Image (cartoon, rainbow, N blue to C red):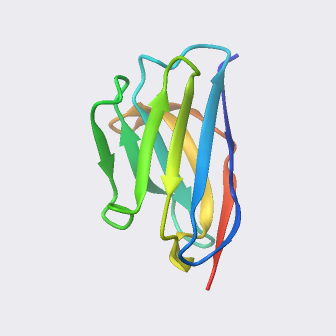
């Protein structure tokens, strides 16, 4: 059974950094674009970043562009989200998902990121 498992979340002060990981198991996701989404309390889930299967093209939400970096290691079946200069408004549950253009058949369970001011 295909599974995505996020890790690396936690509590950090504003201006700090965290690196999230999304490990895939049960199948290879090397053919899939991979994405990070987040959902803050009381808000809808929003797109954060995406990366093509080759890793050569990335795309970011305006709110994180220049601060977050998405990458992937297909040999390890893992996607990463490096988050720098974190802000309190980045507080959310972060999810990884495989897919593209509104179709995401695989989702992880999420990892909590809390940024204190």
- Report x, y in % for residue 4: 64, 31
**Residue placed most toward the observer, 92 or 83:** 83
Residue visible at 53% across and 75% down in the picture:
15
Say whether residue 83 is left or right of residue 11: left
Asked if residue 106 is positioned above or below residue 25 in the image, the reply reads below
- Report x, y in % for residue 116: 65, 80
Residue at the extreme bottom of the image, as rendered: 117
Asked if residue 103 is positioned above or below residue 117 in the image, the reply reads above
Residue visible at 57% across and 29% down in the picture:
78
Asked if residue 108 is positioned above or below residue 55 in the image, the reply reads below
Say whether residue 3 is left or right of residue 57: right
- Report x, y in % for residue 88: 56, 78
Quarter that holds the N terminus: top right
- In the rendered picture of this protein, how many numbered marks are placed on residues? 0
Quarter that holds the C terminus: bottom right
Asked if residue 26 is positioned above or below residue 101 in the image, the reply reads above
**Residue placed most toward the observer, 110 or 16:** 16
- Report x, y in % for residue 56: 28, 30
Residue visible at 30% across and 46% down in the picture:
59
């Amino acid at each position: 059974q295909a599974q995505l498992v996020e890790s690396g979340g936690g509590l950090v002060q504003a201006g700090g950094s965290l690196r999230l990981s999304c490990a895939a198991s049960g199948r290879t996701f090397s053919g899939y674009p991979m994405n990070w989404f987040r959902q803050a309390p009381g808000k809808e889930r929003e797109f954060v970043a995406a990366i093509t299967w080759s890793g050569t093209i990335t795309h970011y939400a305006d709110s994180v562009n220049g601060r977050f970096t998405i990458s992937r290691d297909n040999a390890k079946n893992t996607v990463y989200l490096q988050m720098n200069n974190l802000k309190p408004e980045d507080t959310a549950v972060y999810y990884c998902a495989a897919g593209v253009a509104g179709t995401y058949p695989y989702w992880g369970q999420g990892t909590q990121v809390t940024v204190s001011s």
